[in-house]
Image (cartoon, grey):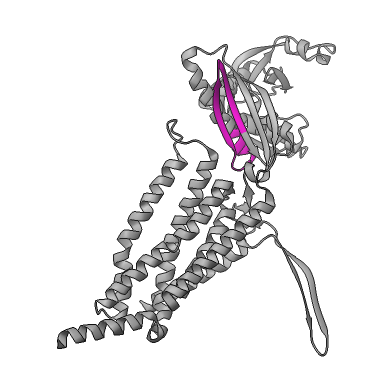
């Protein structure tokens, strides 16, 4: 068991070093000076760390290793959009509004906006979708991306457009008629680069039904143009050289990489079931700001130190070992926040600070249980194992109850009768992560530390004193 605990501690040490590297700031200034009788040394430099990129070792994972901040911390944009329900039956309007919210939320996620909030609202007879986008500087681009209806359809040529007609989009559009192939038949869209021109293009793949339609369209239009329209405006009109039976096509036309990426996101996310118009667009200032966040983390660090001092004063050497496990907890937690990434909001920071206090709960339960076993006259090794084993039921029940609460607050299935606020979900996520990590450090790390190191110190520890006191009491009772 001793050797097994040593192996576990080696793995924990490796995990802690990796977590410490991830948890460190990307820029770390180092300034100090040292005077000696022979020479004066001074260092004034800044250590910089780039993003984590595992593609070099053939793992498709990349992170910037910066904290992701929510709307209330770093500011951002709030966009209120009105959904036009004039063409939707009254009994289907709630469903159409929810579908619009899901599609806009998917577009926002694909756009890479962290801790965004997309929710619906009814104001009188108006149906609205409200999107809160933290950290967005180009708000107009976000409006174009998430508010576009993205109605894609393919049209076949009726007559060859004249040179004058090509100068007018409206006249140009009249030379084509719908084919029945729309964005609903589209399966996926991705950005690729042409092997001939190296320009970005958007590749399309269709569903089984769309593949049949596309094959019929290209078969009867060989030598003619099949135009691609987005929201009623032509994107391009490539000439069909041969029937395309595989259901794969490419949209080209001198795109910039950003334009091709934005178009692929719109098409991949799907078409909105209703027309969307922007009612209000406002820039939100940070209610906390970076300075307040730094103060909050400073307060959390002070709280961590107080907890560690309390553990040492209360439990001596065992408390010190528990503090080492608490440091591992802090490093792993911060590293996970950057790797997931977890976007920090004010409630999320509150969940983090709350989990710090809860991280020592399991250690206190275990140590108190060990006291009881030692007072009962059990040998130290037996008392330690019984302390962990018998305290586990209480630890499990308490933490599972809290995890159930986190599950309800996070509402992963998006039930309408439960919370949908992104802020509350952030609190639930950070608290649940803290509980999970604290269980690992409190049970696995602390237990391994006690097995390896406490044996050497047990003669000078509070455990030995309690053990000796318990034995003397038992001997006195037997003699009496």
Above or below: residue 24 compared with residue 286: below
Q: Is residue 284 magenta?
A: no
Q: Position of residue 245 (x, y in %)?
A: 58, 26
Left or right: 133 in relation to 476: right
What is the quadrant of residue 82 in the picture?
top right
Q: Is residue 353 something one can see in this rendering?
A: yes
Q: Which of 441 and 195 is in front in this view?
A: 441
Q: Nearer the viewer, residue 268 or 144?
A: 144
Q: Is residue 117 magenta?
A: yes
What is the quadrant of residue 294 in the picture?
bottom right
Above or below: residue 207 compared with residue 437: above
**Which corner quadrant holds the N terminus?**
bottom left
Farthest residue to the bottom: give it: 37
Q: Where is residue 207 in the image (x, y as percent from the top left)?
A: 53, 27
Q: Position of residue 176 (x, y in %)?
A: 70, 12
Q: Where is residue 421 in the image (x, y as percent from the top left)?
A: 52, 37
Q: Which of 357 and 452 is in front in this view?
A: 357
Task: Give, as a single range, the part of the protein colored magenta.
Answer: 106-131
Q: How many marks?
A: 0
Above or below: residue 245 compared with residue 28: above
Above or below: residue 362 compared with residue 321: above
**Which corner quadrant holds the C terminus?**
bottom left
Residue ID at (67%, 20%): 231
């Amino acid at each position: 068991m001793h050797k097994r605990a040593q192996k576990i501690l080696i793995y924990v040490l490796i995990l802690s070093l990796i977590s410490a590297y991830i948890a460190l700031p990307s820029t770390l200034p180092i300034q100090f000076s040292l005077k000696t009788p022979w020479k004066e040394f001074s260092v004034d430099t800044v250590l910089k760390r780039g993003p984590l990129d595992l593609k070099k070792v053939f793992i498709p994972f990349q992170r910037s290793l910066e904290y992701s901040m929510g709307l209330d911390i770093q500011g951002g944009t709030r966009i209120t959009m009105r959904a036009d329900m004039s063409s939707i039956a009254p009994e289907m309007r709630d469903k159409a509004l929810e579908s619009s919210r899901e599609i806009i939320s998917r577009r926002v996620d694909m756009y890479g906006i962290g801790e965004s909030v997309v929710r619906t609202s009814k104001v009188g007879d108006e149906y609205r979708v409200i999107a809160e986008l933290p950290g967005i500087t180009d708000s107009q681009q976000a409006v174009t991306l998430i508010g576009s209806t993205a109605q894609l359809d393919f049209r076949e040529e009726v007559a060859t457009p004249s040179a004058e007609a090509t100068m007018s989009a409206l006249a140009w559009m009249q030379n084509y008629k719908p084919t029945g192939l729309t964005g609903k038949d589209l399966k996926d869209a991705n950005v690729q680069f042409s092997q001939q021109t190296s320009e970005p293009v958007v590749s399309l793949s269709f569903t089984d039904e769309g593949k049949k339609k596309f094959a019929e369209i290209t078969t009867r239009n060989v030598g003619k143009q099949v135009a691609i329209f987005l929201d009623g405006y032509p994107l391009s009109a490539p000439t069909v050289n041969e029937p395309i039976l595989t259901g794969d096509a490419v949209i080209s036309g001198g795109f910039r990489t950003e334009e091709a990426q934005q178009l692929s996101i719109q098409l991949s996310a799907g078409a909105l079931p209703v027309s969307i118009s922007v009612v209000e667009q406002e820039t939100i200032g940070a209610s906390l700001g970076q300075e307040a966040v730094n103060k909050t983390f400073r307060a959390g660090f002070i709280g961590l130190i107080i907890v560690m001092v309390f553990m040492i004063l209360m439990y001596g050497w065992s408390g010190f070992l528990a503090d080492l496990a608490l440091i591992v907890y802090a490093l792993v937690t911060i590293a996970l926040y950057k790797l997931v990434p977890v976007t920090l909001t004010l409630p999320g920071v509150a969940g983090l600070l709350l989990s710090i206090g809860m991280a020592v709960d399991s250690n206190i339960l275990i140590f108190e249980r060990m006291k009881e076993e030692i007072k009962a006259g059990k040998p130290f090794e037996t008392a330690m194992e019984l302390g962990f084993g018998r305290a586990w039921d209480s630890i499990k029940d308490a933490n599972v109850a809290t995890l159930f609460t986190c599950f309800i607050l996070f509402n992963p299935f998006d039930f309408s009768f439960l919370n949908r606020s992104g802020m509350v979900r952030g609190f639930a996520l950070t608290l649940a992560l803290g509980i999970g990590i604290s269980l690992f450090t409190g049970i696995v790390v602390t237990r391994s530390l006690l097995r390896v190191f406490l044996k050497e110190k047990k003669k000078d520890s509070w455990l030995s004193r309690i053990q000796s006191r318990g034995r003397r009491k038992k001997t006195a009772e037997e003699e009496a």
